[in-house]
Amino acid sequence: MHRLISVRLLAGFALLLGLTASPAMPGWAQQEGNSCDVEGENKNCPNGNLANANLAGADLASANLSGTDLRGANLQGAILTDANLQGANLQDVDLSSATLTRANLSNAVLIRTNLYDADISEVAFEGAKFQGTICSDGHVTDGPPC
């Protein structure tokens, strides 16, 4: 009986730890010890961590996300017009149907990034790393830029 109670307590404690260690709310990131919410008024989060964030449809126009880790993020349909994504890690990011007009993706990592049906007019891709990237017209490229 004592052993059964101990096992149940341990299981309950493990569940509690799992709940408190759950990921932050979508759109939040840590930046040098400070929280930044790119869905709020301040859309800037340079060198931040937005990995696996759900930012589908977010208005990130003119946001500074340079050097930000966006691996696995959902940016489907996001508005990134004039956004600075220079050096950002966009590996496994869904940018399908996103608006990237005049966005700066120079030196960004675009490995398995989905740009299908995205508006990439006037996008700066200088030095960007492409590998298995789905371009806006649906073709897959390892480079040159879409």
Image (cartoon, rainbow, N blue to C red):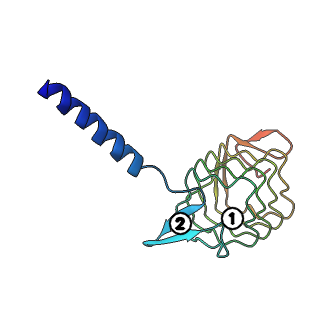
Residue at 65% over, 70% down: 40
Secondary structure under tag 1 reads loop
Residue at the spot of label 2: 48
Circle nearer the N terminus (2, 1): 2
Q: How many marks?
A: 2
Within-10-Å neighbours for mark 1: few <14, some 14–19, many 20+:
some
Q: Quadrant of the N terminus?
A: top left
Q: Position of residue 75 (x, y in %)?
A: 70, 53
Q: Secondary structure at mark 2?
A: loop
Label pair 2/1, CB-CB below 8 angstroms: no
Q: Which residue sits furthest bottom? A: 42
Q: Give the residue furthest to the front.
A: 1
Left or right: where 21 falls relative to 96: left
Given the current orientation, which residue lies at the most extreme left position? 2
The image shows residue 105 at horizontal and vertical percentages of: 70, 62
Give the residue type that dot 1 points to. Ser
Q: Quadrant of residue 39?
A: bottom right
Question: Does residue 7 appear left or right of residue 132 in this picture?
Answer: left
**Three-letter amino acid code at the position of disc 2:** Gly
Residue 124, quarter of picture = bottom right
Above or below, 65 relative to 16: below
**Label ID, residue 15:** none
Residue pointed to by mark 1: 106
Q: Nearer the viewer, residue 130 or 19?
A: 19
Residue 33 screen position, x and y as percent: 42, 72
Q: Tell me which residue sits at (59%, 56%) in the image.
A: 26
Instruction: Pinpoint residue 145: horizontal percent, then vertical percent.
Output: 76, 52
Report how far apart the C-alphas of labels 2 and 1 lie in the structure.
17 Å
In the rendered view, tell whether residue 14 sits above or below residue 144: above
At horizontal 72% and vertical 63% (from top left) the residue drawn is 126
Q: Crowdedness of circle 2 by 10 Å Cα count: few (<14), some, many (20+)?
A: many
